[in-house]
Structures are given as structure tokens and as C-alpha cells.
Amino acid sequence: MQIDVLIIPYVVIIYSSLLSVFMTYLVVRERDLLIATILTLTQGVFYSLLYLLLMAPDLVLTYIPVSVGVTPLLLFLLVKKTERFER
């Protein structure tokens, strides 16, 4: 029972790492800039989870406001000022 409990964080780290790489691929392939911004926000959430599980609280406290808060907000404002779809 004790071994199963120790494996769970490693499984979550691997799963979160793979999902963040997949989100990066989707951001690059997406033509709709609004959806790409939402995918970027999701990627930031996965990276924040990784930093939290890797016990780096200083990185989590700086990464969450920047990657999940400020960057998507600025990207939403930029998409609003330009065209939504990329050619």
C-alpha cells in the first residue's frame, strides 16, 4: 500500500508533462488565436502543477500570476485589437 501512494505524484508529473507538451503542439498548429490563447493558459496550468509537485513553491508563486493571469489577459486584449483568425 505504501508503494502505491509514492507512485501517484510521479504519475501525475509524467501525465502533466505530456499534456503540457501536447498543448504546446496544439498552440503552434491552431489558426484561431483565441483558442490558442486558451490553450496557452491551459499549458501554464500544467506547468504550475509540475512546479508544485516538484516542490518549487517560489516558482509556483511567480508562474501562476504571470502565466495564468497576465499573459493570457494581454493576449486576449491583443486578439481583440487584431484579427482573430490567422491566414
Image: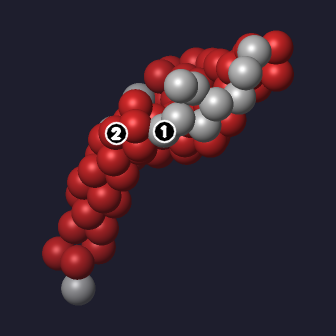
Left or right: where 62 falls relative to 28 = right
Quadrant location, the N terminus: bottom left
Is residue 44 visible in the rendered structure shown here? yes
Task: Give the residue type that dot 2 points to.
Answer: Tyr
Residue furthest to the front in view is 87
Measured in 3D between alpha carbons, the distance from the residue under mark 1 to the one under mark 2, in whole angstroms, is 9 Å
Residue 63 x/y as whole percent: 55, 23
Residue at the image point whose x is 30% and y is 67% from the top: 8
Query: Considering depth in this image, is 14 or 84 the residue closer to the camera?
Result: 84
Count every numbered label the image shows and give the total: 2
Q: Residue at x 53, y 35 (%)?
A: 31
- Identify the residue under disc 2: 25
Between disc 1 and disc 2, the foreground one is 1
* Residue 26 spot, x, y in % from top left: 41, 43
Viewed as shown, does residue 66 lie left or right of 52? Answer: right
Residue 61 sits above or below residue 22 on the image: above
